[in-house]
Every structure is written in C-alpha cells, then in structure tokens.
Image: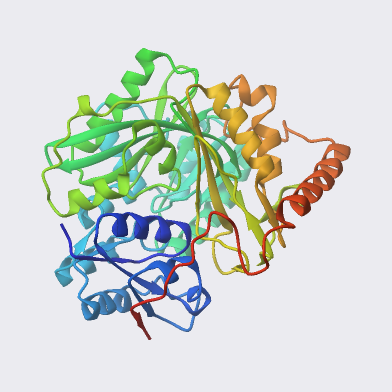
Amino acid sequence: MFGSVLVANRGEIAYRIILTLKERGIESMLLVSPLDIDQLPARTADKVVLIDDNPFEAYLSIERIVEEAKALGAHAIHPGYGFLSENPAFARAVENSGIKFIGPTSEQMSMFGDKLMARKIAIDNEIPVSVGSDTSLSNEEMLEIAENIGFPLLIKAAAGGGGRGIRLVEKLEELDENLHLARNEAKLAFKDDRVYLEKFIPNGRHIEVQILGFNPDMVLNFGERDCSLQRKKQKLVEESPAPNLPKVKRSRLHKYALNLTSSIGYLNAGTVEFLYDGKEFHFLEVNTRIQVEHPVTEMVTGEDLVWRQLQIAAEMDPEISQKDITFKGHAIEARIYAEDPYSDFLPSPGKINNIVHPFGKGIRVDSSIVSGDEIHHYYDPLVSKLIAHTHSREASIDRLSSALDEYLISGIQTTSKFISDVIQSDDFRKVKHTTMYLDNSEFTVPAHIIRIGSLVSAYIYHKSTSSIPANQSSPQVSNWKRSGWRH
C-alpha cells in the first residue's frame, strides 16, 4: 500500500478521502487555495500546501499539482470528483510523472469521456442506447436525420459531462439555431465543438450502476442507485437500491454495466448511467471517478469504496469476488446546497454562523463545513450530504425527513426543508417522480407552509443551540490539530 497520497480536491470529498487515509495509516497530503486554508480538510491533513492565489485555478493547474506532488514525495494522487477528476490530460500527466493515479487509465478515461465513442462501445456490446446520431455530423446532415429521430430531441456535446452542453429542441424550426449555440457552448466549455443528437425521453428515471474494476479481467458490480430526483439535471436525492425495479430488470441492468466496462478491462471506480423508461434501459454515459452519491452504496454494502480504490491503484490482491458483495436494507441521500429553493434556487453564499448536524442510528453526514466557515461563490454550493439507512425504503424516507428537519444551519439558505417536503410527497413515496418532475413544477409547497416551516425551524434552531458555547461548532466536530504545514 502507498505510504502517502495527495488529495487533489477540496471540501467534503477531500475530507472524506483524508479520513480513510488516516484510518489506514497512510500519510495524507492536500493542496489548497487561500480560501480553503482554514477549512476542516486542511486542518486534518498531515501535510498542506498553499497552491495558488487564484481560487479558480487552484484545483485546475495540472502542471502545478504534479510538481507539488513530486516535491512532497507523494506515492499517489486521488482526484476526488469534479475539477480534474475526469480529465485524461491530468491522469496522463500523473502517469508520466511516475506517481500512481487513483482512478482508471488515461486511455480509458478518454474512451468513456468521449460520449460518441462511449455510445459506440455500448452498441458494439449490444447495450441499448437512445435513438440518435452516432457520429458528429454537419448541421445540414443533422437537419436531415432529426425528423427520423423525432421531436423533442436533445443536442449533446460529445465531450460533455455533468449535465453541461445539453440543449432540448422541441421542433425542427428550432434545431439550426440550437445547433450553432450548442457547438459554441461545447467549444467554450470543453474545447471541442462536436455535438450529436439523441431522442429525448421525457418521463425516464435516472438509474446508475456502481462498478469497480480490480484488474483487467475482473470488474465487480456494487449495486445500483436511483438518482431521478433532479433539478435542471442536478441531482438532489439518490437512493439504493432503485425502488420498484423488477428483479429480472435489475439483473439485466447489472449485466449491461459489467459487459460495457469489462469490454475495455476497466480499472478502479466507475459509474454506468442509464435512463429507464419503465420498459428498457438506455445507456447515457460512464463517470470515470468516485461519485458524489457513493455513500448510499457504502451504506447498503458495508464497503469503503475509497479504500477499494486505493487497493486497486496499489495493485493489491482484492480478496473479494462478486458473491462477497451483499446488499442490506435501503439507503437514501439528500444533497444540502447553499441555495434558496423558494426563490428559484438562487445561490446563497455567505458565512455559516452555526451548524448542528443531525445524528443517530442509521444517520451519516458527509461534510467538511463547521461553524464560522464561509460558502464561497467560486465553488460548488454543496454544504453537505445527509444519508439515512434502515431496513426499508419507507423507513429510510421517514428517518431522512426527520434528520433534515433537525439539520439546523444559520447564516445561509439551504435546500434541506425543500427536500424534506419533496421526499414526503405521495409522488416520491409511490415512485412516480422522473428526472423532469421538479422542472415541470409538478411539486409545489403552499406559501403558508413555507412561512410556518421557516418560523418553526428558526425556533427549534434557537432552542437547540442556545446551550452550545460560542467557540464550539457542534457536538459532532472534533478539534483537529494542525500539522505539517508547507507554504
């Protein structure tokens, strides 16, 4: 196993990785921007390097990150999610430096990062994909085939990811203009203006399979997650296993994911994403990294996926097979964002005056935020992830809802109360929601309930925190010792 690992990320995922490194006795190293120098990950890591004066560039400078990793003597680099985690150039630079990259190979990342190539691999392995154009065509050629595909349809960036570079087209007259806009967006975001067309499935569920490739001949399935509750392609709630999925279809889904990734000898963690129309699965993409929602898989399998990533990268004998992976109960995760859901989800950056995390049996909180921290507009507004795990979906929904109501944060607006209301709705409990559920405004909360809920939350918050000393952030936050600083 590695003696040291550099974490090339920030926030809750950096803290999550560091905790596993500490548990396993591996030296943890962290690169931080000036805005993160006093955050919990930096106070927890064994060695910390201030990397850049520019908050935008701190976690995106491939050359600087590799240089600092070599100077620190890091044996491996973990990219987390976001930033450079799915950038083949970064993986290649790490590989060329002699440092181990904790993830798939740069070649595999390139193959699945190109959506057109990923579609071709899926088709070659007889995995269903949505009807679409399987090559990048000129605008004139796309106009010719669009009517055969049918409307509405999607324009997608071939190099896209994370919901970016996608445009919905309702009718033929809108296609040409949107093709030009999509190409410009793709070139600006990904330096690649290739786009393709895909049939739009309006009432689908987003279901993904967590896989880990332990060696080129052994890829294992760690179950599926349903991530259908989204707003503008941003996931808000994830759960495992996917509810109301017949056993035969679940088995077929897992087989698709394993066949796809095994066909290229995939290594390390990956997530194969599908859209489920109630009858068939349609392949979407492969995320070549650890996912934001990996905790729900950990809760139902009892596995530490970050530790498994380390084992794979270190080429250790996994001492595991598919029959060793068992699933217990139901887990559901809510993403708590610094946004105001009752003001069109406007960002709510600012200083967190106080935060009290919920706790109890079957409750897990993944967060790096403590009282006094500031949510900056430079970065993703994720504050924390709240996970509930019980014996059944109904019980997990109830437990998560109660925990969300107990999650008290002052100083900023968050999505916690909104998500609590959504998951208690009949539509969610009966699994009637799709990826378009919130975008179509099918779920609303009466204004008087919003006002009452805010008043009640404020009162409960005041009562629960009045006895906490001003210098203590929360009963669940430890006082981490600073050590190994390097500027």
Residue at 53% from the left image edge and 54% from the top image edge: 476
- With respect to residue 73, does 442 lie above or below? above
In front here: 334 or 409?
409
Residue furthest bottom in the image:
487
Image-quadrant location for residue 88 = bottom left
In front here: 213 or 484?
484
How far across and down, in percent of the image, does residue 150 sit? 53, 29
Q: Is residue 61 left or right of residue 318?
A: right
Residue furthest right in the image:
448
How far across and down, in percent of the image, does residue 405 sit? 69, 41
Residue at 43% from the left image edge and 44% from the top image edge: 141
Residue at 18% from the left image edge and 53% from the top image edge: 313
Residue at 65% from the left image edge and 47% from the top image edge: 407
How far across and down, in percent of the image, does residue 13 sit? 42, 56
Q: Is residue 433 left or right of residue 78?
A: right
Q: The C terminus lies in which quarter of the figure? A: bottom left
In front here: 379 or 322?
322
- With respect to residue 323, does 9 lie above or below? below
What's the coloring here? Answer: rainbow
Residue 392 visible? The answer is: yes
